[in-house]
Structures are given as structure tokens and as C-alpha cells.
Image (tube, rainbow, N blue to C red):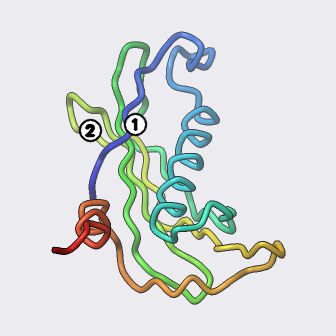
Amino acid sequence: MNFHTRKWIKPEDLNPNGTLFGGSLLKWIDEEAAIYAIVQLGNQRVVTKFISEINFVSSARQSDIIELGITATDFGRTSITLRCEVRNKITRKSILTIDKMVFVNMGEDGLPSPHGKTEITYSKDRLKDESPSG
């Protein structure tokens, strides 16, 4: 799993206990997972269909730096399934895991649309495919 997105925990991200508010973290995860799905499927029209059990393993505090890791685990005809882990950047201690997040590829008509993808695409592969030959 690649960890690319990092967040610095600030006072406005905290709950009354002085730890990271779970709702803030879930918002960041949904946004990052949607971006991941958009990049993988090559379509900006994707929607969150399902998020499995969310397992909060530990918490983060003010000034911690956390990182979000997301990877594709399955490609359906119109969907992509992702797995997510959030961890402390410095200690590498796990904060949260989500085993299954499903996003659906939507057509211009607002209905699920086949995407034709079967495996993870990395941006360097896309650059190689798009470079002029000669």
C-alpha cells in the first residue's frame, strides 16, 4: 500500500477529548478515496457506494502528522473496491483501517457505467503510454 496523502492535525481537527475527531478523518478518507477512484477509472463522475466497518485502532493528537494509504483490491464491471489504512507518519502506528470501500463509475446520464479497467494503473505508466514515439 502506498501512503501519499498527509495531514497535519490542527486544533480545529480535535474533539473535546483532545484527539482527532473521527468525522474529520472520515471526510478526508472519503475525499482521498474518491480521488484515487477517479484517477484509476479515468472518470470524474464516481460516487461512494459502500464503506465497510471502520476500525479505529488508535488516535492522533494535535501536531501529529498522519498519512492515508489507499489501494485497489478489486475491479467490478462498474465499480472499484478500495482498502484504506491511516497511520502516524512518524511512529508508523496504525490509526484506522477500512477493509472495503466501493465506488461506482457513473455515466453522463447519472447511471452506473462500465469502466473497462481490470488492474491498478500508476501515473508513470500513463506517462509512458502518452509519450510520443519516434
Residue drawn at x 50%, y 73% as measured from the top left:
81
Quarter occupied by the C terminus? bottom left
> Relative to 12, does residue 54 appear above or below in the rendering?
below
Answer left or right for 74 relative to 90. right
Question: Residue 100 or 48: which is nearer the viewer?
Answer: 48
Query: Which is nearer the N-term, disc 2 or disc 1?
Result: 1
For the view shown, which residue lies furthest in the front direction?
A: 134
| Residue 58, numbered label | 1
Q: Where is residue 83 in the image (x, y as percent from the top left)?
A: 43, 63
* Crowding near the residue tagged with mark 2, few <14, some 14–19, many ≥20 C-alpha atoms within 10 Å: some
> Relative to 112, does residue 43 appear above or below in the rendering?
above
Q: Where is residue 99 in the image (x, y as percent from the top left)?
A: 46, 65
> Relative to 95, does residue 60 appear above or below in the rendering?
above
- Give, as a three-letter code, the residue at label 2: Lys
Identify the element where label 2 is drawn: loop
Q: Do the residues labelled 2 and 1 touch (CB within 8 Å)?
A: yes
Identify the element where label 1 is drawn: loop
The quadrant holding residue 89 is: top left
For the view shown, which residue lies furthest in the right direction?
A: 109
| Residue 38, numbered label | none
Q: Distance between the residues labelled 2 and 1?
A: 8 Å
The quadrant holding residue 111 is: bottom right
Residue drawn at x 57%, y 56% as measured from the top left:
34
Q: Mark 2 points at which residue?
A: 93
